[in-house]
Structure formats: structure tokens, C-alpha cells
Image: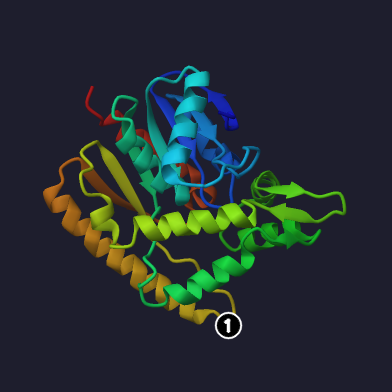
């Protein structure tokens, strides 16, 4: 099995494994990781087909979980709290579910999805499919930096993360990652997992789990005001499901952070504080 790319941020204490979102890389965690490694040993992983990790086919959550376990074995990490953002949050939950002896707990930072039947999902899916695995122009990184500035993300942080999440091509363009075939498989996996909603997905979870929602919605691009309405409706639906879960599931904690979905890039200090506090409160 080919090893995934792992970055060891060092530190001493409880071990944390950080997972990034779709189309991103472990560089998204740089700012939070520096804060977390003051009291933890911190590693971050590039998911298959992302950053500097090799791709896999088919791209399925069980296969990804096995690859992560193999990579952590190679780095001497027998047990850890797994923390994921977005797609990484989904993987973090599934890693903990599949590895009860290896995962003390999991943190899911705004890693929720909608089934194909969710109102408006078809329009969102069309946009995602259109951009999956495309070749971006030479000015791609500059465009990412400009867009990130709307969320208060420093230019140097935004540029480093954008470069780490794409592959430069000889003609100056950029291959966005994951490439198209893997991207389509990822979307299929997410639709499968969340076909019935968040509550059925978390059925049977009995390990300590922190679920974090974004407190602010991403502002829609011009001409996409409908996406703002979709996001608000979806976030409200997830909030209602999570509120119901916490009343009957003592191992599940729900929190909200004053940030958009880009929370680990936008407010790394708040994310690090939330994760560190959760880890301190774990039994044992």
C-alpha cells in the first residue's frame, strides 16, 4: 500500500491527527497546528488524491480509512484524536468508527453533506461537477489569494495553502486536485453517506465526538444568491438534527464557531482553542 503524505508538526502530549477538506491539503492546518503542538504531538495527512498524496481508485471512505491507518503506523502513531475539516471531518468520524482501539475521539469541523434529494442539491452538484479536476489558469493562485482576503485570511497563508492544494504544470497552469475521476467518486461517497441525513449517519457512534458548525455562512458569489438561501436552509436543518442528537447521545458534543466554513484558515486560533479544550476534557 502506497503511503499517504504526512507532515509531523512535532510537539509533546496527546497525539492529534489533522485532516483537511475537499480540494485542499494539510497546509490548511499550518496556523492551527503551530498553536496545538504546544501541548500535543500534531501530525497532518494529505488525503488520497490531494496535496502530495497519491490517488486511489476507487476513492471510498473505507479505503481512505485504511490508508490513513497504514500511514500512522509508519509514523509510530498507535492512538490519536482525529480532527477533520469538511470532507476531513467525515473521514475523521469514519476513521474513529472503524478503529475503536486507535482513535480516542474525533472532531468534525463543519463536515456535513446533503443527499441528492435535498432541495437545491442538483444546482450545487452541477457547479461542483463543472469545476472538478479542472486545469486552472496561471493566475489561479492570485485569484485564490484575492478571494481569501474577503474572509480575513492573510495573503501569505492563502497563497501557501493554494499552492499546496494544486499541482503546477509545465505551461504555467495548475491542475486542481483531486483530479476529475477521483472527485466524482468522492461526491458519490458523500451522497451515499448522507442520503438519509446527519442523524442516520451518526447512528451507532459511541465514542467521544465533537461536531462543530460554522456560525456564519459563506457569502454567495454575484449571480449565485440562491446558494446563500440553500446554505442557510441546510445549516438550519443540520442544527436541528444536532440539537436532537445531543439530547439522547451523551458522547456527542455540539459547538458553533464564529467563522464561515473556512474556519481553520479563517480563525485558526479559535479552532485550536476549541480542539485543545475538547481533548483536555476526554476521559483518561
Furthest residue toward front: 58
**Mark 1, residue position:** 223
Classify residue 195 as left or right of residue 137: left
In this rendering, the answer to whether 269 lies above or below 197 is above
On the rendered structure, is 149 left or right of 269?
Answer: right
Query: Does 81 sit left or right of 240 as displayed?
Result: right
Q: What is the quadrant of the C terminus in the image?
A: top left
Q: Residues within 10 Å of mark 1 (few under 14, many from 20)?
A: few
- Determine whether, in the image, residue 272 is placed left or right of residue 146: left
Residue 64, image x and y in percent? 47, 39
Residue at x 35% of width, y 69% of height:
234
Does residue 89 lie above or below 140 as drawn?
above
Let me know if residue 108 appears in the view: yes
Residue 235 point in image, percent of width and height: 35, 66
Q: Where does the image place residue 68, in percent across and percent down from the top left?
A: 48, 32
Residue for point 66% across, 38% down: 52
The residue under the point 28% across, 67% down is 237
Instruction: Count up the numbered dots.
Output: 1
Element class at badge 1: loop
Quadrant assignment for the N terminus: top right
Residue 270 in view:
no
Q: Nearer the viewer, residue 27 or 193?
A: 193
Q: What x and y, as percent, mark residue 202?
A: 26, 49
Which quarter of the figure has residue 258?
bottom left
Q: How is the image coloured?
A: rainbow
In the picture shown, does residue 123 fall above or below 180?
Answer: below
Amino acid at each position: 500500500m502506497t503511503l499517504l503524505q504526512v507532515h509531523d508538526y512535532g510537539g509533546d502530549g496527546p497525539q492529534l491527527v489533522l485532516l483537511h477538506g475537499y480540494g485542499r491539503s494539510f497546509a490548511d492546518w499550518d496556523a492551527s497546528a503551530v498553536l496545538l503542538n504546544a501541548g500535543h504531538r500534531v501530525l497532518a495527512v494529505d488525503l488520497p488524491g490531494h496535496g502530495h498524496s497519491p490517488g486511489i481508485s476507487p476513492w471510498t471512505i473505507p479505503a481512505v480509512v485504511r490508508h490513513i491507518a497504514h500511514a500512522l503506523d509508519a509514523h509510530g502513531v498507535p492512538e490519536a484524536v482525529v480532527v477533520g475539516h469538511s470532507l476531513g471531518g467525515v473521514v475523521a468520524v469514519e476513521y474513529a468508527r472503524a478503529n475503536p482501539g486507535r482513535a480516542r475521539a474525533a472532531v468534525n469541523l463543519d463536515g456535513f453533506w446533503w443527499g441528492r434529494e435535498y432541495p437545491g442539491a442538483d444546482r450545487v452538484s452541477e457547479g461542483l461537477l463543472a469545476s472538478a479536476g479542472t486545469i486552472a489558469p496561471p493566475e489561479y493562485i492570485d485569484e485564490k489569494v484575492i478571494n481569501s482576503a474577503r474572509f480575513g485570511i492573510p495573503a501569505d497563508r492563502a497563497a501557501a495553502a493554494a499552492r499546496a492544494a494544486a499541482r503546477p504544470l509545465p505551461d504555467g497552469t495548475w491542475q486542481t486536485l483531486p483530479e476529475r475521476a477521483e472527485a466524482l467518486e468522492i461526491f458519490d461517497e458523500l451522497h451515499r453517506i448522507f442520503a438519509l441525513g446527519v442523524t442516520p449517519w451518526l447512528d451507532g457512534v459511541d465514542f467521544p465526538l465533537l461536531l462543530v458548525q460554522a456560525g456564519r455562512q459563506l457569502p454567495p458569489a454575484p449571480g449565485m444568491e440562491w446558494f446563500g438561501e440553500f446554505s442557510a436552509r441546510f445549516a438550519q436543518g443540520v442544527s436541528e438534527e444536532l440539537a436532537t442528537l445531543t439530547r439522547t447521545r451523551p458522547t456527542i458534543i455540539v459547538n458553533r464557531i464564529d467563522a464561515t466554513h473556512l474556519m481553520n484558515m479563517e480563525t485558526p486560533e479559535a479552532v485550536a482553542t476549541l480542539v485543545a479544550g475538547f481533548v483536555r476534557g476526554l476521559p483518561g
